[in-house]
Image (cartoon, grey):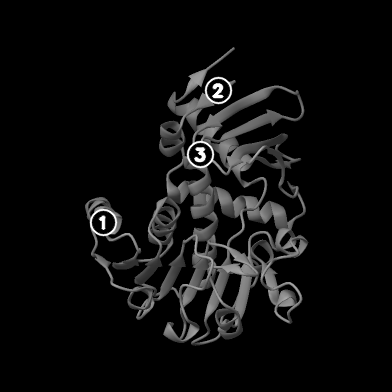
Amino acid sequence: MRILSDADVRAALPMAVAIEATRELLTARRAGELVSAPRDRLMVGATGLVWTPGGHGPSHIGGLRLYLTGVEQNDQLVAVWDTASGKLRGLAIGAFLGALRTGAIGGVAIDLMARADSTVLGVVGFGQQAWSQVEAARAVRPISRVQVYRRDRKALAEQVALAERTWQIPVWPTRSAQAAVEGADVVILATGASTPVIEAGWLEAGTHVNALGPKYSGNQEIGLDLIERAGQIVSDFPDQYRREQDFMLQGTAHAERLGDLAEAMEGFWRAEGEVTCFLSHGLSGTEVWLVARALEEAERLGLGQSRG
């Protein structure tokens, strides 16, 4: 049994490797081999304990991710078992895996749905989740410029300086969300906003949008104008959205338009100038799959703590 820290997961799963592993996971989902149970939680006072289980029969892996909501600290745990022997393969402890998982799924969506010649990336909200999405976009497209907006100007300046040192490409801070998305080929929305942060009319023809933030009635990062403009809308876990009564598309004609990313991987085609949109949810089982891969790499590279 092996225990991995955030640093171990970073070393074992560079973004390009995580994206490729996620493609394999979505192929398994399309084949009906991936078990993606709905997330659930219990309340401990004002704090929620959330778990997202999943597994893959042919690989004999099963496990779950555990984390808290309603607290400032965001320590998380992913446990992976060998379902054939019953042995615990290992644990990953830390907050990095959540962003890596979301970034890798977003990277698959961008690679599938965005134009092949996309070079300009617009970002609204520039925290850890957005950073991971940018790294994923750079892994699948020749991104040469990033335009970013964040309401906290001091934090934005600090992140822009770090991003330029890290990525060695121009990263432009903008004064508004509109300025961040205008002229962009791919747009990343990664905010906690309760009202739409962009207007569909700001987008150029042929833009692809990855929306990571809230998508619930009265608490939504995007508006129906974006859904109406998008020729295709896809999610990594549409079944979960459809179970949620406050999902922003519930009861609208657009609910049936929501496609499954795993299914879209086979034969996806976009019309010239078509706007496309990916609604990120967080597919249950992704963390288990990625940690299983990280554990294999960690053993090969001598990373983590081996117990027993």
Identify the image quadrant of the C terminus.
Answer: top right
Q: CA distance from mark 1 to mark 3?
A: 23 Å
Which element is circle 1 on? helix
In-image side of 165 versus 293 (left or right): left
Q: Which residue is mark 2?
A: 2
Estimate how packed mark 1 is, as few (under 14), some (14 to 19) or many (20 or more) residues with alpha carbons within 10 Å: few
Which element is circle 2 on? strand
Q: Which residue is mark 1?
A: 154
Estimate how packed mark 3 is, as few (under 14), some (14 to 19) or many (20 or more) residues with alpha carbons within 10 Å: few
Q: Which residue is mark 3?
A: 74
Instruction: State which tag comes first along the sequence, 2 or 3.
Output: 2
Q: Which residue is painted at 49% across and 54% down in the image?
A: 103
Mark number displayed over residue 193: none
Front residue of 180/217: it is: 217
Q: Amino acid at mark 1?
A: Lys
Front residue of 115/195: it is: 195
Front residue of 239/225: it is: 225
Q: How far across and down, in percent of the image, does residue 306 sit?
A: 52, 17
Q: Amino acid at mark 3?
A: Asn
Q: Amino acid at mark 2?
A: Arg
Q: Are marks 2 and 3 in contact (CB under 8 Å)?
A: no
Q: Looking at the rendering, which quadrant does residue 281 occupy?
A: bottom right
Q: Are marks 1 and 3 in contact (CB under 8 Å)?
A: no
Which element is circle 3 on? loop
